[in-house]
Amino acid sequence: MEDLENNTTVFSTLRSLNNFIAQRVEGVSGLATPGSSQSSLQMQYQQRVQLEEQAGQIHSKSQLLQVEREKMQMELSHKRARIELEKAANTNARNYEREADRNQELLTRIKQYQEREMEAENKLKEQMEMNKSYKKSMETMSKKLQEKESKLAEANETITVLKGKISELQWNIMNQEMQMTSQDSQKQELMEQLEVQHKKWQEASQQIQTLQASQSLLAEYEQKIKDLEQKLSQQEHDALIVKNMKAELARFPKMERELRQLREENAYFREMKENNGLLKEEVEGLQRKLERYEKLQAQLVTLELENEKLLGKLKSWEKLDQSTGLNIRTPDDLSRQIVALQQRELVLKEQNSTITNSARILEKARQQLQEEIIRVQSQLLDEKKKREQHEALVRRLQKRVLLLTKERDGMRAILESYDSELTPSEHSPQLNRRMREAEEMVQKLHAHNAELEVQLSQVLEEVGNQKQRADMLEVEMKVLKSQECTADQSVFVTKEEVDALRLKIEELEAERSKLEGENRALEMKLEKLTLQGDYDPSKTKVLHFSMNPASLAKQQRKEEQQQLQEECERLRELVRVLEGGGSIPEKLEGVGGFQSPQEIA
Amino acid sequence: AYGINSILYQRGIYPPETFTRVQKYGLTLLVTTDPELKNYLNNVVEQMKEWLYKCIVQRLVVVISSIENNEVLERWQFDIECDKAAKDESVPREKSQKAIQDEIRSVIRQITATVTFLPLLETACAFDLLIYTDKDLAVPEKWEESGPQFIANSEEVRLRSFTTTIHKVNSMVAYKKDSFP
């Protein structure tokens, strides 16, 4: 409704506008005069503009209204759509609920059916099992029936067989009874024979008994004979033993005497052994001492030899002072002299080195100066050459100038003659031709001239270069000659110094080689000493563990030695006591008694 | 410690049945089972390790002497040169464990081989371990100063050396020349 109202207002405004414009147009067309045209036009224009603005505004307003209308329509449609959606949703929900209820009912029915199915299946299974069991029982029953029938058939067969067997057995019994009677008769006969033989056996046994008795008697007699023989042999043995015993008894005192002698000899030999041991140890000790003394002697001898050598050297050194006359009494003086000589040598060497350095510097300076001289001379020559070239150029140019002036004069003369000739005669074309030819000739001549001059200049340059080279070589020759002269002069001056220096160098090299040899010898000695285990006591010290195995071994050794010495003393006391044969104390008796049975055995 | 055990076994200082075999440096070496000896060796080796780290040790000597007359018969000497700058360097020295073990193995093999030309030790012997250190080192408890135990009339033989880039060990053996030719 608002929209419609808006539309009506819009249309009303539009109508008013159109009316106004129509009026104005009529007004404008009526008042079309040039006098007030401009102001009315302006007014019309302004009105038109205002109208147009209003039209635009109204147009925009109409657009707005249309847009708003469309918006309202959209909203309405939106609302309708929402309402429809809600309705649809509600209907869907209701349908859904209905279907859910139906589903539940169906599910309950399905469950019931499933339960009934399960029950039916169970019943089926039970019946099947029952059937199976019945079948099995039926089968067993049938089997049993079959077995019974088979057994019956077998039984019938056995009955027939047994009946046959019974008849056979009866026939056998008859036969056996017949045999029994015959065997009884045989038995009676055998019994009679048995009795006869029994009697015979009794007689034989009686004979056997008598024989056994006689055999036993025989054995007894044999045993008695053996016993008697044994007794005889024993008695013979005893007689022999008695004889031996008597002989031994006779020997016994001799044996006792020998025993005593052997014991004495044993003791003596033991002492001798101990003495021998002690003597061997003494001998070894003495041998070692001997060796040491011999080594000492050898060392003494070598030391004496060295001493003599050193004395000889000393004497030679002492003679030195007499030979050199330098007031030398002691090696200190010698060393001082040597030190002074060495210092002088050092000073001289330094001087020598400074002199050689200055000589080198001077030589270098001289060489540099000579090079400069050469350069300067070459430059001089170059400039001379250039000057000569310039002078030659100048002469050539002057000659040219003269030639040109002459040519000009000639040409002027020719021209004047031609001019003088021209006015009277009319041989101008021939004369022109002759002029041209002459000019051409002149130009050719000029060109030829220029070429010749160029060649000349080149040749002159080459000549100049070669002259320059020749001059340079002469200069160098002069310089070398001058160098030779100066070298000869310096050689004479320093030859003596060089000889002295060479001698010094040789002496120093000899000393150096000697020192090197001594150095090597000392290094070898050092090496040997380090191998032997030497060390510098001021820088190193030797440590070892207090409880080390060597000391432990030494302690054990000492203890063993002490124990052995104590045993030795005890044994010595025993021996003394035994030798003395006096009262033996109880402690020693046991030891002596232990020893004597060992000796007897 | 393994070198010392080898020397003790090879020279017969202790009976062979008191040694048992172990694998080390790729060789089968024999080490003692005697508890006193093991204890002694462990004490010495522990102290040596400490001193080696501080680069104080100059030499280790195994002295074999006869028990009867205290005469020194053999001297196994191991000189140790320590690069003291190695402690201050931050970059570790490049030498593989295997290379060091190969060198140690060659030294132990050489010890075993030198036994063939050493004179026989006929008397009962005992051994001692001497360590040469800097003079200004504090002597720890249980240790004491001793003499260098030189051999009077000795022959010396230089053996191989091996290096771990921080320590260089030179080995040599000195033995008493036989008095009877």
Image (cartoon, rainbow, N blue to C red):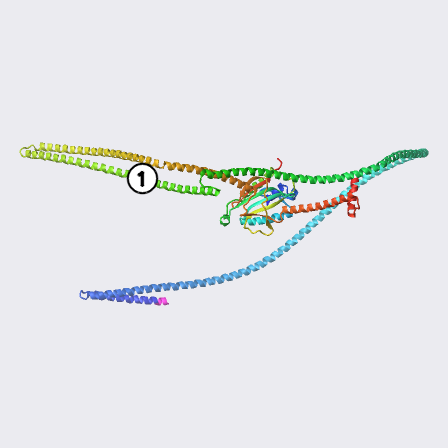
The C terminus of chain A lies in quadrant: top right
Q: Quadrant of residue B172?
A: top right
| Front-lying residue, A204 or A62 | A204
- For residue A84, say whether it is visible: yes
Residue A443 horizontal/vertical position (percent): 15, 34
Residue bounds of the magenta highlight: A1-5
Residue B119 at x, y = what percent? 62, 38
**Most foreground residue, A417 or B13:** B13
User: What quarter of the picture does the N terminus of chain A occupy?
Assistant: bottom left
Instruction: Check if residue A143 falls in the magenta segment.
Output: no
Q: Residue at x 64, y 54 (%)?
A: A120
Left or right: residue A112 versus residue A458 is right
Residue A111 left/right relative to A576: left
On the image, numbered disc 1 is attached to which residue? Answer: A366
Q: Position of residue A368 (x, y in %)?
A: 31, 40
Res A148 seen here: no
Tag 1, which chain? A
